[in-house]
Image (spheres, rainbow, N blue to C red):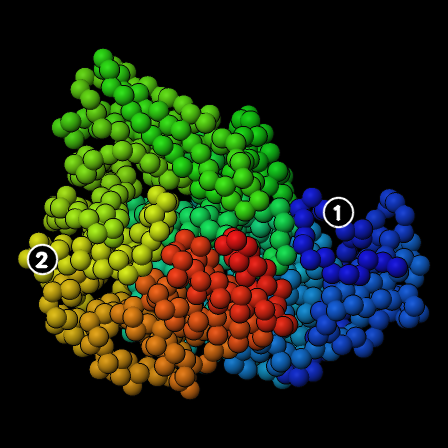
Amino acid sequence: MPQTKPQPVQYLADYRPYPFTLAETRLDVTLAPRDTRVRAELDLVPALTGAARDLVLDGGAGLRLLALTIDGVAPSEDHVTRTDERLTIHAAALPRGPFTLATEVAIDPADNTAFEGLYLSGGIFCTQCEAEGFRHITFYPDRPDVMTTFRVTVRSDLPVLLSNGNPVASGDGWAEWHDPWPKPCYLFALVAGDLVAVSDRFTTRSGRPVDLNVWVRPGDQDRAGFAMESLIKSMKWDEEVYGREYDLDVFNIVAVEDFNMGAMENKGLNIFNSKLVLASPETATDTDYERIEAVIAHEYFHNWTGNRITCRDWFQLCLKEGLTVFRDQQFTSDLRSAAVKRVEDVQTLRARQFREDQGPLAHPPRPDRYEEINNFYTATVYEKGAEVIGMLKTLVGDEGYRRALDLYFDRHDGDAATIEDWLKVFEDATGRDLSQFSRWYTDAGTPILEMSETWQDGTLTLTFAQSTPPTPGQPDKPARVIPIAVGLIGPNGDEVVPTRILEMTEARQSFAFDGLGARPVASVLRGFSAPVMVRRDLDDATRAFLLAHDSDPFARWEAGRELALSALTELAQGRDAGADYVEAIGALAADGSADPAFRALCLNLPGEEEIAIRLAAQGITPDPDAIHDARGNLARRMTLTHQELLSDIYDDMAVTGPYSPDADAAARRSLRIASLGLLGRIDGGERAEVLFGIAGNMTERMAALAVLLRLGQGDAALQVLLDQFGGNRLVMDKWFSIQVMAAPPQNAARIARDLAARDDFDWKNPNRFRALLGGLAANHAGFHAADGSGYDFTADWLIRMDAANPQIAARMSTAFETWPRYDAERRAHARAALERIASLEGLSRNTREMVSRMIAAGR
Ligand code: B3K
Ligand code: ZN
């Protein structure tokens, strides 16, 4: 008997190649909401070596098998085994040479609330196959290293019928597509619906004309133009910077309302969450616009990093995700402000990935085990995966990086590759030994870098000691190579030593700078050259000096951040602090020569979660209420001190003329709303009320609304939005989330419950669910309310969601990932909530894995 029991844990070490190759896949899909028929023909070739092998195909319990033949003949029943997860055809029933397996199954897309496989979203048939959704469409070797070309016929009365690749032929009620590029089935896509396109054309630099379409629901066309512009910019950028051209005659993007994540890079047919396509000044914020541009680029860039070169197995996920995030970050820094983008990326990394690394869900960028792969689309795989590539680039230099990437595309085009392959191209292209570097991929945790310095006879010596705290399953970790970018600044504020990369390879290491006249101040980890936490004994006056003089914009921002964090952590523990910060920040805010977006970044205080992360890293139990008050008090003090300046900034930064989402206009608005947020602490919400009434763009209206809600004065504005946009789902998502996010913490869970009781809380829609539950999780003191109300509310809804959509439930359960760091009372509430979820009968594998990892950490 073949092995048919499901494997609860998958291990990297167990990888074996699939014992068949697939020469072509032909699909014929007849769509019907409750009874879709999928006929599949797979041309299979058994591996030449070894004994005859069983043919094992993945396939979910929802597939109703109607027919099965091998070369046109049905195998006898005792040669076929079916479980809830797979179909096995015994070797005895298989030819020794090439053969065609044909199956027909019936599936029920209308019943698919998990949005994995083929499902319906607002009357549109669409698919999501990554990571393992294709097995809910037909029986198939659903693994990324099985690649082949696809020929697909879609049959339906709906007007628009799409699949991957190039259109071949179509007629009344059918369309045929052919994708000439071999791909794994996770990149398969199919869409059918009443859709309209915003269209354009792009000619690649070798002269291939490409038809571009952004498909949306009728009526949404006027909000799809920015997505199209972003696509064209991405195509151009990838040609110019990476030498990568597009490789099909058409590129289609489709926006759908129900989508488990942001978007998906299916070959030639990207499917997007509508919130990452649709934008107009009245409905989308500057942040939405920037995000749309970045995600359109990200999915487009996957065409080379992900599709042409894919992953051998899901353990290698960061091979495509880390690299593609790195590429989209480069794209945004080229198009907008590089300095601002770097700061934003580091903020995201710290808020999400450092948080993950500090808690029970910590794992390396390349994990070596998982139960449910969908639980590993994490900040560590994506954002830390990108940081690791940034370090590699720093170590080998821009030239070396370019050579390595050229070699990667050359050598691995058409492959399902591994992290080892990736590192090998860098070794071969640059001659560097990367064995120590590879630990960044295999070891979890954020290294802590302690720095001390000595000054003697014109020599400054910097000594670093690295250590990485234990993470689940990895108690001890050896030293890694850490690129530390350092510059030195003289007492008069001039740079005396420009940026130099120190390569730290030992657990403890010193670097000397000699021949210096007067003792300089070291500017360390410039550009955030490695994803580590620096511990350095620096007084506030020196930090203020760096904030005023550092020539590296990241390090300059970081100096202000450190000043703020040192003040906030002191204040949160009941001690007075903050004078230096308030003074220094005033000087920076007043510096009209600095980029307004940069000034805005400096004016925005660290969030409450970031303060909690810092306290926890110092071994202090964070008190969410004290953190909330500390932050409010410091903001108030800043505002009282710089009232006039902030008020001038608020007036000066008003943008006149028609709205444009470009970086300059967005920068001015960001500084304006940073001042508004502060001024709202002392002006009784006066400015916010006026601005909400007159602003023609959503950026300023949302900022104004947040101020009003914080003051408990948001009701009228909420009603205005509801009247104006009650029928616009994306605006209503914001309406839901901002109410809980900006609520005074003690009211947050109650407000969330009231909102959840509304008829328009369409909870099965992932955006709406995330808006509310994610909004509460983002209200740090509200979610972690001492009475457990935030935890209870969240657990109630996770339980409900798990039965409908396990991926969303599991993803949102990460709201609990920091629970072990709080006090005993909160921990007891959180543990009870987690255990209530864990005890549920029929809990999905997704949520079970997450919750049990989180509970285990509290033991
Ligand atoms: N590759 C997809 C993510 C798929 C998530 C599956 N749970 C989008 C992206 O990273 O581009
Ligand atoms: Zn991606």
| Image location (x, y in percent) of residue 193 | 56, 79
Q: Quadrant of the N terminus?
A: bottom right
Which residue is identified by label 2? 640
Residue, far top:
457
Side (left or right) of 518 relative to 753? left
Quadrant location, ligand no. 1? bottom right
Who is closer to the viewer here, 752 or 246?
752
What is the CA distance from the residue labelled 1 to the residue labelled 2?
Answer: 65 Å
Who is closer to the viewer here, 805 or 727?
805
Answer few, some or many: residues within 10 Å of disc 1's Cα (few below 14, many 20 plus, some between 14 and 19): few
Side (left or right) of 583 relative to 838? left
Side (left or right) of 342 relative to 266? left
Q: Is mark 1 within 8 Å of ligand 1?
A: no
| Image location (x, y in percent) of residue 633 | 18, 58
Q: Quadrant of residue 840?
A: bottom right
Helix, strand or loop for disc 2: helix
| Image location (x, y in percent) of residue 762 | 46, 81
- Mark 1 near mark 2, Cβ–Cβ under 8 Å? no
Who is closer to the viewer here, 781 or 117?
781
The amino acid marked with disc number 1 is Arg
Mark yes or no: residue 223 visible. no
> Residue, x 35% and y 59% (percent of image)?
290
Point out the tag, 1 or 2, that comes first from the N-terminus.
1
> Residue, x 38% and y 53% (percent of image)?
351
> Residue, x 27% and y 80% (percent of image)?
718
Helix, strand or loop for disc 1: loop
> Residue, x 53% and y 66% (percent of image)?
835
Which residue is identified by label 1? 16
The amino acid marked with disc number 2 is Leu
